[in-house]
Image: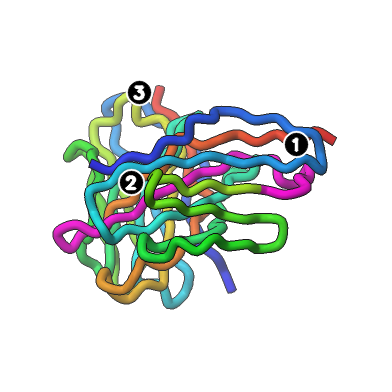
């Protein structure tokens, strides 16, 4: 079975541009989360989507947005890029079916390395 | 606000030594979940364990063991008889559900180097 896939692998942008990152969850997983990992730091939670609805949001500015499609794949969009947005962006999927049962383990993709010049 | 502290930035051990990675967390919730992940040099995070706040039993899985103590808000991870393949960055994480939303907080990670 395929794991979580992310595209592109690497991306170079300049300040002020926007970027779209894509994620395909493990087949059958309906929950997708996005994280930003700056070099040398732990992942920081950006969003969680479940059944195409936003179910969690971290402390990120409105320049960051996301959506989940009917096939449960997801896009993360970042507008007006800043140098500080340079990071590894991780997508994780989970088989959890509700927020009431305990969160299941998340399976992470390989990430998209974004460099903003 | 929730917080996860991994005070050890880097640890080096010689192969076959035991090593303990510390994790201290802060939360106001009574129901929460704790996780450990491994991030090898390839970069992909690998799930190791999940523990809920009501289960304080220690767990052992092969050479790995976890000690959860609510009294000290700690969830420490021990690797017994370390091997070179254990070299990686290890993250502790805390998950809470608030207002119907799930929020996950990771620590800053501990880089473990096992020297042959």
The part of the chain drawn in magenta is B79-102
| Image location of residue B33, percent across then percent down | 37, 58
Label 3: chain letter:
A
Cα–Cα span, label 1 and label 3: 34 Å
Disc 2 target residue: A45
Numbered disc in front, either 1 or 3: 1
Label 2: chain letter:
A
Q: Is residue B30 left or right of residue A2?
A: left
Disc 3 target residue: A83
Magenta stretch: residue B98 in it? yes
Looking at the picture, tell me which residue is in the foreground, A37 or B19: B19
Do marks 1 and 2 share a subunit? no
Locate residue A24: give its quadrant: bottom left
**Would you call the spot at circle 2 few (<14 residues within 10 Å), some (14-19), or many (20 or more)?**
many
Disc 1 target residue: B114
Instruction: Give the mark, 3 or 2, whose residue is nearer the N terminus.
Output: 2
| Residue at 33% in and 46% down | A45
| Residue at 23% in and 39% down | A59
For the N terminus of chain A, which image quadrant?
bottom right
> Of all residues shown, which one is farthest toward the right?
B116
Could you say whether the residue bearing mark 1 is in a helix, strand or loop?
A: strand
């Amino acid at each position: 079975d395929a794991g979580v896939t992310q595209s592109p692998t690497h991306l170079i942008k300049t300040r002020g541009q926007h970027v779209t990152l894509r994620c395909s969850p493990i087949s059958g997983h309906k929950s997708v989360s996005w994280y930003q990992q700056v070099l040398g730091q732990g992942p920081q939670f950006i969003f969680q989507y479940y059944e195409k609805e936003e179910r969690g949001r971290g402390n990120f500015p409105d320049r960051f947005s996301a959506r989940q499609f009917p096939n449960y794949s997801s896009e993360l969009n970042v507008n007006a890029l800043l140098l500080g947005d340079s990071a590894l962006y991780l997508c994780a999927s989970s088989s959890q079916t509700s927020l009431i049962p305990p969160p299941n383990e998340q399976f992470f993709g390989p990430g998209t390395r974004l460099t903003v010049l | 606000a929730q917080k996860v502290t991994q005070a050890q930035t880097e640890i080096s051990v010689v192969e076959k030594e035991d090593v303990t990675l510390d994790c201290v967390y802060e939360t106001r919730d009574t129901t929460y979940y704790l996780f450990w992940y491994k991030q090898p040099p390839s970069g992909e995070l690998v799930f190791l364990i999940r523990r809920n706040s009501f289960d304080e039993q220690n767990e052992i899985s092969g050479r790995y063991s976890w000690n959860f103590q609510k009294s000290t808000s700690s969830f420490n991870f021990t690797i017994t008889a370390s091997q070179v393949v254990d070299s990686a960055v290890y993250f502790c994480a805390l998950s809470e559900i608030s207002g119907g939303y799930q929020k996950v907080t990771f620590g800053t990670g501990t880089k473990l180097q096992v020297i042959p």
